[in-house]
Image (cartoon, rainbow, N blue to C red):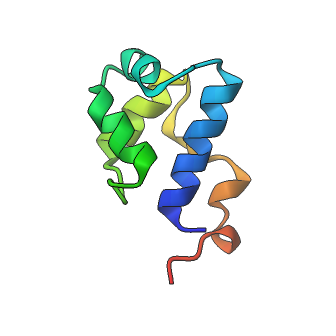
């Protein structure tokens, strides 16, 4: 999977785990505009900025390192070709 796909999957998994029902609720927790969340989740934003990912992680109550500390992001699981 691509890095973008891994980010989308991680966000979706965390939304389920944290009982966040939709992008609007996540946007409220993150302090980001809902359109930013929807753009990331739809894949329109292929490589979200560190700023965006920082606040998405914050919305889940975690740091960036905690967000990326998942098997999805192991190098052997990422294929950008």
For image coordinates 64% across by 70% down, the residue present is 75
Above or below, comparing residue 7 to residue 33 in the picture: below
Which image quadrant is residue 30 in?
Answer: top left
Residue 12 in the image, given as x and y percentages of width and height: 59, 38
Residue 66 appearing in the image: no
**Residue 16 image offset from top left, x and y in percent:** 67, 28
Is 37 situated left or right of 18 in this image? left
Where residue 53 sits: x, y (%)?
40, 41
Task: Please give the count of numbered marks on the rendered protein.
Answer: 0
Observer-nearest of 54 and 12: 12
Where residue 13 appears, as percent x and y from the top left, is: 66, 37
The residue at the point 67 percent across, 56 percent down is: 72
Measured along the vertical axis of the image, is residue 27 above or below residue 67?
Answer: above
Report if residue 46 is visible in the image: yes
Residue at 56% in and 20% down: 21
Q: Quadrant of the N terminus?
A: bottom right
Q: Residue at x 44, y 27 (%)?
A: 23
Relative vertical location of residue 71 with respect to residue 20 in this rendering, above or below = below
Q: Is residue 57 above or below residue 27?
A: below
């Amino acid at each position: 999977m691509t890095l973008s796909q891994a980010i989308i999957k991680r966000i979706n998994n965390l939304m389920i785990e944290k009982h966040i029902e939709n992008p609007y609720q996540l946007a409220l927790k993150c302090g980001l505009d809902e359109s930013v969340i929807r753009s990331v989740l739809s894949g329109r934003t292929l490589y979200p900025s560190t700023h965006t990912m920082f606040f998405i992680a914050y919305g889940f109550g975690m740091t960036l390192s905690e967000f990326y500390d998942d098997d999805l992001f192991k190098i052997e699981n990422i294929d950008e070709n």
